[in-house]
Image: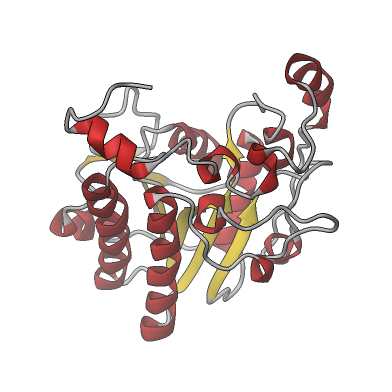
Amino acid sequence: MSVGPVLVTGAAGLIGGWLRGGLPERGWAVRSLDVVPLVEVRPGEDEVVADVTDLAAMVDAAAGASAVVHLAGIATESTWPAISHVNIEGTYCALEAARRAGVRRVVLASSNHATGYTPRPDEGLLTEADAPHRPDTYYGVSKATMEALGSLYADRYGMDVVCLRIGSAFPEPTTVRQLATWLSPADTVGLVHAALTAPDPGFAVVWGVSDNTRRWWDLTAARALGYDPVDDAEPFAAALVEAYGDPGPADPVHARVGGEYATGAFDAERIEAQQVGLAEEP
């Protein structure tokens, strides 16, 4: 394990908070970067307040780091100008800053929404190869672009870049779909740790979900990195099914990998119109 800290972008967010607590327990020092100050800086933690799209600031933040874990970005659908600037430009800056600072490993928080229009399998589990890019939103496009940029930096510059196609990262599942897609806090930390420590992964794309009984995704590639999930959403199943029913694969939210993002509920043009005052709230 390298002696430098792990630079975590988007550290003030939900997943960032989990990593700020969990990575030090696994021996990592953490340098936390966000555009807003942290509510509480933990003992031994370095804090950097900077915009992930500021390349010069990112290069400074990456200096001396052992790895970069890039979480920063808009975490749902938004307008194209916002998504393209924060998510796509931000990913470029994270990778380019790592390259310029001599950081050889980058872990990117991708998403199932990079493949959101992929049909849910009738049987068996989806491998990463079964789900090429079929983004369901501008947000999904930004994650597909993230993976493409990661591939470029791995091939052109010999960096190790691991893309985690995260499902639903929440403290606990809150919908029936999340019984398949949930990634628990403990498994989030375990997956990132595996991505940081896997020997010579080169460029890798892996599903990021817990070992859910109802999951749709094959975890073979993630396990090959050293991921050993400890959680399963099934203990939450009875209460969620009682509350919401148990929709079958024909239900629009359950028919495709991206869930409601692939149903039109996150229509980008409507959202953009709302933000410029041309449409009413739904």
Looking at the image, which residue is at 40% across and 57% down? 141
Taking the image as drawn, is residue 47 in sight?
no
Looking at the image, which residue is at 81% across and 25% down? 237
x%, y% of residue 146? 40, 62
Furthest-front residue in view? 279
Residue 263 falls in which quadrant of the image?
A: top right
- Determine whether, in the image, residue 234 is placed left or right of residue 188: right
How is the structure coloured here?
secondary structure
Residue 59 falls in which quadrant of the image?
A: bottom left
x%, y% of residue 9? 35, 46
Which of 137 and 75 lies nearest the eye of the viewer? 137
> Compared with residue 158, is residue 104 higher up or lower down, i.e. above or below?
above
Q: Disc count in the image?
A: 0
x%, y% of residue 27? 55, 47
Taking the image as drawn, is residue 80 in sight?
yes
Looking at the image, which residue is at 74% across and 46% down? 229
Which of 175 and 270 lies nearest the eye of the viewer? 270
Looking at the image, which residue is at 25% across and 61% down? 93
- Determine whether, in the image, residue 71 is placed left or right of residue 254: left
Residue 212 falls in which quadrant of the image?
A: top right
x%, y% of residue 167? 60, 45
- Determine whether, in the image, residue 127 is placed left or right of residue 7: right
> Compared with residue 267, is residue 144 higher up or lower down, i.e. above or below?
below
- Determine whether, in the image, residue 64 is placed left or right of residue 115: left
